[in-house]
Amino acid sequence: MSPQVACVLLTQAKRPDELLRAVDSVLRQRDVDVDVIVVGNGAEPPGMPEGVRVLTLPENVGIPAGRNAGIEWVSGDLVLFLDDDAWLAGDDVLATAVRLFAADPDLGVAQPMVHDPEGGPTPRRFVPRLRVGDPARSGEIVALWEGACVARRAVLQQAGAWPDEFFYMHEGIDLAWRVMGAGYTVRYCTELGAYHPAVTPERHAEGRYLSARNRVWLARRNLPTAVAVVYVSVWFLLDSVRLRSIVAVREHLRGYLAGMRLPCGQRRALSWPTIARMARLGRPPII
């Protein structure tokens, strides 16, 4: 019997052609059984192929909460999360993922190498290392690009899954930190491949605000107080020097203030050994 992989695809039904491409890339996977659900985030997804279930949420609850909503509807010890504008590169991605997780009981989440479908270089943000180096080099990571990844279901449960409160941006960092805090590893696995257009997160109208707010929430949710102060201060300065307009300055300040004022979910401060481990991997949680 082939292993079963749970597959959660998220959409707002604004890209029907791209969604069908993503679904097809999952259904074409060989040597595994896929249990697929498409979550419509405040919108009814278009007609899906036979065997693909649809869950329509009455409103857009955000990307992390939308992914979380789909988990309980699909079966499998591993869970694939795939955005509707991403797709798997080849028909053996999930079978390879199954082998990687079976070989390493400590592996919590695996992120594939993401390719630009236009043939350009891999964008920096698709390789979640402070020093990107060779995009074709696998390795343990401290952050996570969220558009395509495979997670162990049991580890998701221990880590609290995706942070519903974030709505959009930096939810992959939060999940990676919590997976590490639970004693597991997060790996960038070039044995796995996916495609995604080389677009920037700031294309969304509220990107600047949400990025700033969620930076503060990352610190409040996960870091010891002393480290949290340094983390927020460093990112405030880094973000500030990149601003190029009055509108950007306003959204930047609004986001940081909201991050300090608004509730951000359950706090689980990382242990000092986990922080030391992050530092050894080249990305202590202050940058």
Image (cartoon, grey):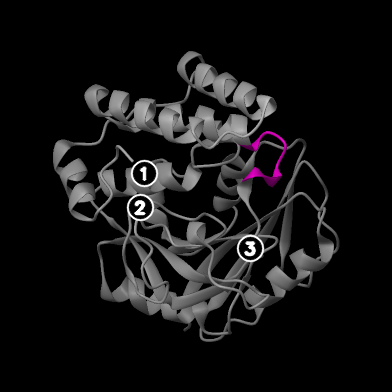
Residue 101: x percent and y percent?
Answer: 34, 71
For the residue labelled by badge 2, is the local secondary structure a helix, a strand or a loop? helix
In the picture, the quarter occupied by the C terminus is: top left
- Give the numbered dot on residue 159: 1
As shown in the figure, which amino acid type bears the numbered disc 2? Val
The CA span between labels 2 and 1 is 6 Å
Amino acid type assigned to the residue bearing label 3 in the image: Ala
Which residue is more in the foreground, 153 or 233?
A: 233
The residue sitting at 45% across, 32% down in the picture is 215
Against 116, is 164 above or below? Answer: above
User: Splitting the image into 4 quarters, where does residue 202 fall?
Assistant: top right
> How dense is the environment of label 3, judged by Cα within 10 Å: few (below 14), some, or many (20 and up)?
some
Image position of 260 with respect to 99: above or below? above
> What is the magenta range?
202-207
- Residue 158 in view in this figure: no
Residue at mark 2: 155
